[in-house]
Image (spheres, rainbow, N blue to C red):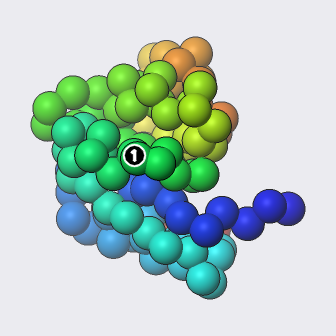
Amino acid sequence: MNVPARALVVDDLASSREWLTRALRLAFADIEVVAAATLAQARACCTPPPPLALIDLGLPDGSGIELIEQLQPRGTLCIVATVFDDDAHLFPALHAGAQGYVLKDQAPEA
């Protein structure tokens, strides 16, 4: 498995950003994690594009789907981070290029 050196976490809730950052560091001990609370902040962190991004869909200044559409063609593995596990939320993200999702109500170790 190719271990990513850097990841982007995008979530407007500080507690969720911390949870996702912790989960990444548990999975990849030496990973550099950059966090953003808005779509605009996330876009500013994407030069160069990160190898991995955990992206919330509901952001205060837009949809995480917009970021997925921008990052996925540039080689970023985009994972949706959400509390929703229904088709109405996940299918649009998968259609935009997300390659998976994590549910934020799980333990970070999961």
- 90 left or right of 41 in image: right
Q: Position of residue 10 (x, y in %)?
A: 34, 50
Q: Is residue 43 above or below residue 95?
A: below
Q: Residue at x 27, y 55 (%)?
A: 36
Q: Residue furthest bottom?
A: 29
Other residues around mark 1 within 10 Å, as few (<14) / some (14–19) / many (≥20): some
Q: Residue at x 61, y 68 (%)?
A: 5
Q: Residue at x 54, y 64 (%)?
A: 6
Residue that mark 1 sits on = 46
Q: Is residue 109 visible?
A: no
Q: Is residue 98 above or below residue 12?
A: above
Which residue is nearer to you in this view: 44 or 109? Answer: 44
Q: Quadrant of residue 99?
A: top right
- 64 left or right of 96 in image: left
Q: Position of residue 29 (x, y in %)?
A: 62, 83
Q: Position of residue 61 (x, y in %)?
A: 14, 32
Which residue is nearer to you in this view: 67 or 27? Answer: 67
Locate the C terminus and report the quarter of the image it occupies. Answer: bottom right
- 7 left or right of 43 in image: right
Q: Position of residue 95 (x, y in %)?
A: 58, 16
- Mark 1, secondary structure of its residue: loop
Q: Residue furthest front?
A: 48
Q: Is residue 34 above or below residue 32?
A: above
Amino acid type indicated by mark 1: Cys
Locate the N terminus and report the quarter of the image it occupies. Answer: bottom right
Q: Is residue 110 above or below residue 54?
A: below
- 6 left or right of 41 in image: right
